[in-house]
Amino acid sequence: MAKSRRKSAAAASAAKSSRPSRKRAGGGGARAAQGEKRRQAILTAALEEFSARGFAAARLDDVARRANVAKGTIYLYFRDKETLFQELVRAELSPVVEALERAPMVDLPLGVVAERLVELFVREIFATRRKNVIRLVLTEGPRFPAIAEFYYREVISHVVGVLRTLAEHARERGELPNDSLVRFPQLLGAAGIVAIVWSGLFDRWAKLDAEAFMRAYFDLIFRKEQAP
């Protein structure tokens, strides 16, 4: 009987000790979610501050103020201002790059590909704050080569690789009379960059319809390519 009571007591003790463990696990998940929410707030504040002041003039104190956190909290997530900028680029643009790389467009006619590129750019870049990230790289990259190098490695090299592959397949199918787009796949993305630059400089006086602009550009490109 005594042995049975000891077993029951041990089982009860084990059950009791397991309950705090479950609570701690749940608390850990909540803390992780709160940490991610704080990280996203810092990234949002960083984009606002970088956009307002530029990379050089932006201060982490001001980023912290915008994010409503202590400055020291930023260092829990990012090593320094440059790392913060790099993570901003990665967080905003990597999902778009990955979507482009996964898109099943290799066997589509290049004209159809161009239509889809326009739709993707307008929906995922131009109509969102991502265009501000690209604009920041365009303005700050010449003065801060490390930023330009990071952007090239994380974004441009992947995008150009996809565009070159699409152009190569179009050339193999006889859709292109020469290899201009294979050698210079940047042409397929040039209109998007022009639209971003224009919107940042001149939209207050002459707003650009980015979608119509890009479609007109591709009409010119493919008309030239298909001309006898």
Image: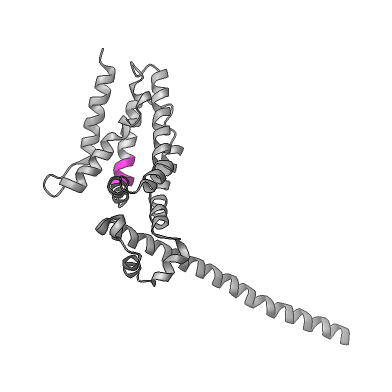
* Residue sitting nearer the eye, 55 or 209: 55
Asked if 78 appears above or below 139 in the picture, the reply is below
Inspect this view and state whether residue 33 appears.
yes
Please tell me how many numbered marks the rendered image carries.
0
Inspect this view and state whether residue 1 appears.
no
* Residue sitting nearer the eye, 210 or 155: 155
Query: At 42% from the left edge and 18% from the top edge, which residue is drawn?
Result: 172
Residue furthest left as drawn = 205
Residue 17, x across and y down, in percent? 69, 78
Residue 10, x across and y down, in percent? 78, 81
Asked if 56 appears above or below 20 in the picture, the reply is above
As drawn, is 103 to the left or to the right of 224? right
For residue 211, which quarter of the picture?
Answer: top left
Give yes or no for residue 106 being in the magenta stretch.
no
Give the extent of the magenta segment. Answer: 120-126
Colouring chosen for the image of the structure: one colour
- Give the quarter of the figure containing the C terminus: top left
Query: At 35% from the left edge and 31% from the top edge, which residue is drawn?
Result: 113
* Residue sitting nearer the eye, 25 or 68: 68
